[in-house]
Image (cartoon, rainbow, N blue to C red):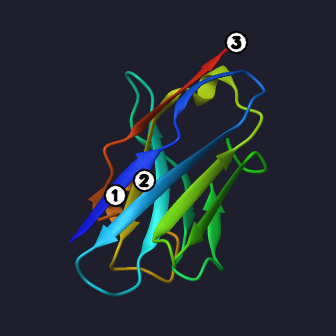
Amino acid sequence: QVQLVESGGGLVQAGGSLRLSCAASLRTSGPYAMGWFRQAPGKEREFVGGINWSGSTLRYSNSVKGLFTISRDNAKNTVYLQMNTLKPEDTAVYYCAADINQPYVAPVTVHDYDYWGQGTQVTVSS
């Protein structure tokens, strides 16, 4: 069982930055991959970035590549999403997710992930 809690969302002006955190609590040991997704009103949940257990594999959606950076600290059971040069179209609820079945890859689809956080709102004003 994995519980995920996101934090760090808020309101920021276009061009600004935010860093999201996702703290994971695990009742079972073992590696897991982590991902960040987002969902804007009226839209489907979309992949933002993913990181494998060791941090050696990173994946990003084309829309955030070069602007967002995903990282993790396994000693703290925490994954981060540094978001720079934010745009109004980045406005969404951001979710972190854990994949315990494919810990050494960085999956990119919603269906790959087993556990989800409750989400944190990010609003970028123009």
Secondary structure under badge 2? Answer: strand
- Tell whether label 3 touches label 2 (CB within 8 Å): no
Q: Give the residue type that dot 3 points to.
A: Ser
Please tell me whether residue 102 is drawn above or below residue 114 in the rendered image.
below
Q: Mark 2 belongs to which amino acid?
A: Cys
Quick one: SS at disc 1?
strand
Q: Earlier in the sequence, mark 1 or mark 3?
A: 1
Q: Is residue 102 left or right of residue 16?
A: left
Q: Nearer the viewer, residue 84 or 60?
A: 84
| Residue that protrudes farthest toward the front in the picture | 76
In the rendered image of this protein, does residue 111 appear above or below residue 31? above
**Rendered image quadrant of residue 45:** top left
Residue appearing at x 41%, y 84% in the figure: 31
> Badge 3 is on which residue?
126
> Image quarter for residue 49?
bottom right
Q: Which residue in the protein does label 1 denote?
A: 4
Q: Dot 1: within a 10 Å radius of its alpha carbon, few (fewer than 14), some, or many (20 or more) residues? A: many
Q: Which mark is residue 96?
A: 2
Visible residue check, residue 103: yes
Measuring 53% from the left and 62% from the top, which residue is drawn there? 79
Residue 97 image position (x, y, % from top left): 39, 58
- Give the residue displayed 31% in from the left and 44% down from the top: 118
Element type where label 3 sits in the image = loop
Tell me the amino acid under the disc marked 1.
Answer: Leu
Q: Is residue 80 above or below residue 38?
A: below
Question: In the rendered image, which quarter contains the N terminus?
Answer: bottom left
Q: Position of residue 63 (x, y in %)?
A: 67, 41
